[in-house]
Amino acid sequence: MTGRRRADTDRSQQLVRDQLDAQAVLAPRFARGAFGERQIATALMALTRPDGAGRQRWFLMIDRAWPGTRSANVDMILIGPPGVFIVDAKEWTSQPQIHAGVLCAGLDNRQAEIAKVKAMIRPAQHALARRLQIVADIVHPVLAFAGHSVHRNHQGVMLLGVKELRPTLAGELPSRLSTADVTAVHEVLAQVYPAYEPCNLPADRVAVQAAAQVAGGLFEPQDILDAEVAAATARPMERWMTFLHASQLAIVRRTYTGPARISGPAGTGKTVVGLWRAVEAAKNTTGPVLLTSLVRMVPRVQARLLHQMRPDLAHRIDCVHVHGWAARFLAERGIEVAYDAAAAENEFSHAWLAMRGSPLAALDPRPVYWRQEIDVVIKGRGIAERGQYRASARPGRQLRLTEGQRDLVWDLYERYQQRLVHRGIADAADLLMRALAEARREPPQPGYGAVIVDEVQDLSLTALRLVSAVAPPGANGLLLIGDCRQKIYPGGYRLSDAGLSITGGRSEVLTVNYRNAPAILDAALDVIAEQRLEDIDGTMVTGRPADLAVTHGAGRVVRVSEETESQLENQAVAAVRELAAGGGYGEVAVLCYRGAQARRYAALLRREGIPVVELDAYTGDPTDRVKVGTWHKAKGLEFAHVLLPGPSSAITDAAKGYQSDDESATLARHALHVAMSRARLTLWLGETSRAPAKPGALA
Ligand SMILES: Nc1ncnc2c1ncn2[C@@H]1O[C@H](COP(=O)(O)OP(=O)(O)OP(=O)(O)O)[C@@H](O)[C@H]1O
């Protein structure tokens, strides 16, 4: 017998022994209970035997009261290194199936079971957030089916057959909790879901008098082993939160005597720490807390998470993107600003028409470059006069401009501004400038207890001034969170431009990546490895950080090359189906450089019968649909599997050979780095062979 086969046999025998032991412990409990429930409990209980060192790594609680209900019960609660599983046992005659997005048993609609098991996990989420500072998504709802084989994710609920239970829960999910954490969680949940009688397997084998009698009800060891190697990850995309590491907790609790900053590469827990600081601020101050970001999607997701973390405090934390905040603030003050992005764009095009033959067009014929110059330099830095613009720093803009060229830009700006005034409309930068003027005139009332800004690297100087104008002075007033490697919009600033300083121990750098499989992180960092970047405090950092640790195990980068675009699309559809087979569609994202390409992929997947939600419409709530959107829109999110069609050609596309192209290509590379680093387990990079090898070729 080979060593491997011997190990398999030993394992099988151990499984059978565990099951017999479990049956002996469970038999009295289920004397009158359903056979199916006993099968399910047996499968889970086999996990609870202490390991060789005597450590209890899994706990099982059976038949617990469901808090908040009079008589309802929770069938099983399993707690182990991957998290908490609230299990509702089902013994259906018909195979569970999903028809048109609805859970069915044969022809019967059983969708209500989904809402029920989701409601069951809430007391656990709230208790863990409040008492252990663990946020919700280590708690998983599970429908376990006796007598059926099923392995899928439906609307954030794991649907598993008896055979699939153990291999999925214990074999596929990464460890999130240490042994000590598991014990702490168990203690809390034992109180939350009362009426507990311990039923874990003892360290020493129990005497199994009834072994022969119960053995007939068990499954074959080989079946279990087969199931263990089958199936893929079944974890909802909306995982996000977790325990805080001691170093993160220290940052959450630290008092900063003035403005502070948290930085660190992708996936190092910056957002998690920011959310917990928002909670701390809500606890320790009387005013509301502002949690903001340039990206519209990020506050939406954060608001949802805060509701899970601290439902009692979430209403005190105002989650809104910067432009949304500015518009609301001005409206509250009765100041009408007719913000109209599309009409403003149109006015700019007209203003540019008059400049087409000017030397500016020779420098870069793309109007968008000059529009950005106005947005991020003139309005973005709040420049009010021609002379000021002539002398102004233009951080982040690689194209050098002479005084004469700056005069031409100023002419273009004046022309554009006159058109906006004439039409009575404002663009996004105007909105921020007006809000800043108003906040300086009279700060918002009631004043904020704290202001926390995520993705701070993408703010304009005006936006930074605005958030610092509404932040309270003094300790813990303003926290800036960001990563200059993920800067995807043009322009820039130094903190000193806004009169801010983070010296004196008020700058934290996180250096442990908790999100990405090592191969994925490596590929994502390769894209920006050669760069040296100026951070917002003026220090220089390298694209590939020197001291980044990883915590994730398995994962892969898949590179696909096809001759034509339509062949690549076919490959992408096949990959989406394959990746979704394990954990459902909700764990898969297709991210594109351009909006038009994203819309094409969304339409393609829909034609293929694959459920899709576009990132524009995504609320952050769990949904079993493939997420499709641009690299930019994926900022701050994460998914188990990410497909990127045509990344090299996108970067080539960004660098068409104009003088300003270094800057465009750098930003596109950063956006690609962001998109790649959204993937936890699988990163699929697809190219057509027509894509030029340079300058966009990926390492
Ligand atoms: N101490 C921890 N243990 C385990 N997982 C963690 C820990 N801290 C954070 N995570 C997880 O790591 C992932 C990344 O965290 P988060 O989104 O906060 O990182 P980030 O630095 O803001 O990322 P990015 O800048 O790429 O958006 C999340 O899934 C989060 O739940």
Image (cartoon, rainbow, N blue to C red):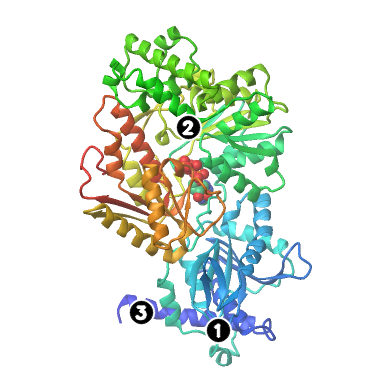
Q: Is residue 517 visible?
A: no
- Say above or below: 637 vs 553: above
Distance CA(mark 1)–CA(mark 2):
69 Å
Q: Is residue 97 left or right of residue 184?
A: left
Q: What residue does disc 2 label?
A: 342
Percent across and percent down for residue 580 are: 43, 62
Which numbered disc, 3 or 1, marks the residue that appears first in the sequence?
Answer: 3
> Camera-side residue: 559 or 546?
559
Residue 2: give its label.
none
Mark 2 element type: helix
Q: Residue at x 52, y 56 (%)?
A: 176
Q: Quadrant of residue 9?
A: bottom left
- Say above or below: 106 vs 629: below
Q: Residue at x 31, y 45 (%)?
A: 647
> Camera-side residue: 222 or 638?
638
Structural crowding at the residue carrying mark 2, measured as other residues with C-alpha within 10 Å and reported as few (<14), some (14–19) or many (≥20): few
Which numbered disc, 3 or 2, marks the residue that appears first in the sequence?
Answer: 3
Residue 20: give its label.
1
Q: Residue furthest top?
A: 387
Q: Amino acid at mark 3?
A: Arg
Structural crowding at the residue carrying mark 3, measured as other residues with C-alpha within 10 Å and reported as few (<14), some (14–19) or many (≥20): few
Mark 3 element type: helix
Mark 1 element type: helix
Percent across and percent down for residue 316 are: 70, 39
Q: Amino acid at mark 1?
A: Leu
> Camera-side residue: 4 or 438?
438
- Is there CB contact under 8 Å for labels 1 and 2? no
- Say above or below: 521 vs 442: below
Mark 3 or 1: the one toward you: 1
Q: Quadrant of residue 66?
A: bottom right
Q: What residue does disc 3 label?
A: 6
